Image: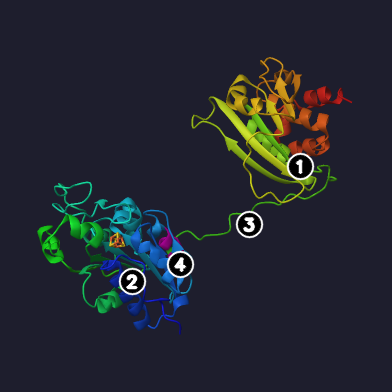
Amino acid sequence: MNSILKTTELPYCKGCGHDLIAKKSAQALENLGLSPLDVIVVTDIGCHGIIDKCLNTHTVHGLHGRSVALGAGISFGIENPDKKVLVFIGDGGSTIGLQHIMEAARLNLNMTVVVHNNMLYGMTGGQTSGLTPRGFCTTTSFEGNPFAGYDICELTHTAGAAYSSRIMGVGDITDELVEAFSVKGFALTEVMEICPSYGVKLNPRRKLSEILESSGKKTGVWKNERKAFVLEQGKKSYDLLEELKGVEKDFPEVLASDLSLVISGSAGEGIQSAATLLASAAMRSGCHVTQKGSYPVTVGVGFSTAEVNLSPEPINFHGIGVPDIAIITSADGLAHSKKRIEGMKKGKLFIDESLETPSTGAEVIKRDFRSAGARSACMYAVIYFAKSTGIVDTESIYKTIEESGLAEKMPLSKIKEKIGSLN
Ligand code: SF4
């Protein structure tokens, strides 16, 4: 069996308590008979998180404060109860992601969280965290933190965690960690330590035991007799993509090279729907497509812009700076996409005839798109673009519209009539 740690040379500053926690955690896992691939370690942002590269276990590195949420997701998804989900987090991450910890404790998810509480943000320069005790000096409270830190053990215990403990990060803590790691349900162990680089320097001559005592907190273990959460208690998860119907290729291929489109109009005028219908129709001709929408949070007011990429090849990047084609159907859309249109050195701009044409190197095609009605102007413009360029088969667009049930909601025959006169 491989050891949990790849090396005993860990990358922390000399004297850092994280070194002890990592080594004793590895020892505790091994004492429990766990091999590296039985263990999923999730780390957070902070000095403790640089342990990832030293582990032979599965590792996941989370965003700041989100490691417990990731661990919770893994705990939810793992069917084998013999696998161990172990989350390492600092005092900063614990308070940034406090709600994640509280929810995992409330549900009593089967996982262990080790809080590396050195009472400040070590990685970013020694700032005060939510677990910094009153009176402890940091680089953002030189005269001592005026506020009491949260009692993370009391919080998790009250929330319903099976096991909460606070231990001093000195000496051999393997047995305490073995006890926490053996819990079936949510276990949190807060390990008290001082960061030599900031905590010791800013709090000279203060001992860890005295700091803890003056904070009013104690070492100890707090338990709730509860069964661990089992998946059947929650909603069954399923593959969200499973129910999506694929798009069959039932039209001939027409697109020879990549094409990017920006389609802009007013919110509530069917911009995103028109883009989706165009993208779906293109897929029927074997195109690869991406679609991205942009609009203000105030749904129904202001601009609405859709970015669509079409390609005969798989698309690995969906961003569009300056597009090949711009389709503009209202003043809101023009205002939102004007800079990009001005940046076009070539390509085509399809724009409603009521709008002022911005300065652009693109070929300008003006048309009475809004004559189809505000809510159908974009659809008309998209079909017009397809017909006049031949890039997407208009018949595939009509068929897609009819199958979507949207044909009733737009003057399709009027649009067809206008498009037909293009022949
Ligand atoms: S800065 Fe502090 S917390 Fe970070 S590795 Fe160094 S001693 Fe440890």
CA distance separating discs 4 and 1 = 41 Å
Lower sequence index among marks 2 and 3: 2
Q: Specify few, some or many for label 2: CA neighbours under 10 Å numbering under 14, 14-19, or 20 or more.
A: many
Rendered-image quarter of ligand 1: bottom left
Q: Which residues are magenta?
A: 70-75
Looking at the image, tell me whether mark 4 or mark 2 is earlier in sequence order: 2
Instruction: Say which amino acid is labelled 1.
Output: Ala
In the drawing, does residue 328 fall left or right of residue 284?
Answer: left
Mark 1 or mark 2: which comes first in sequence?
2
Disc 4: which residue: 59
Q: Residues within 10 Å of mark 3 (few under 14, many from 20)?
A: few
Q: Amino acid at mark 4?
A: Thr
Whether residue 267 is visible here, answered yes or no, is no
Q: Position of residue 411 (x, y in %)?
A: 74, 25
| Cα distance in 3D space between marks 3 and 4 | 28 Å
Q: Where residue 134 sits: x, y (%)?
A: 14, 52
Residue 282 bears which disc, if any?
1
Reading the image, the residue beneath label 3 is 242
Q: CA distance from mark 1 to mark 2?
A: 54 Å
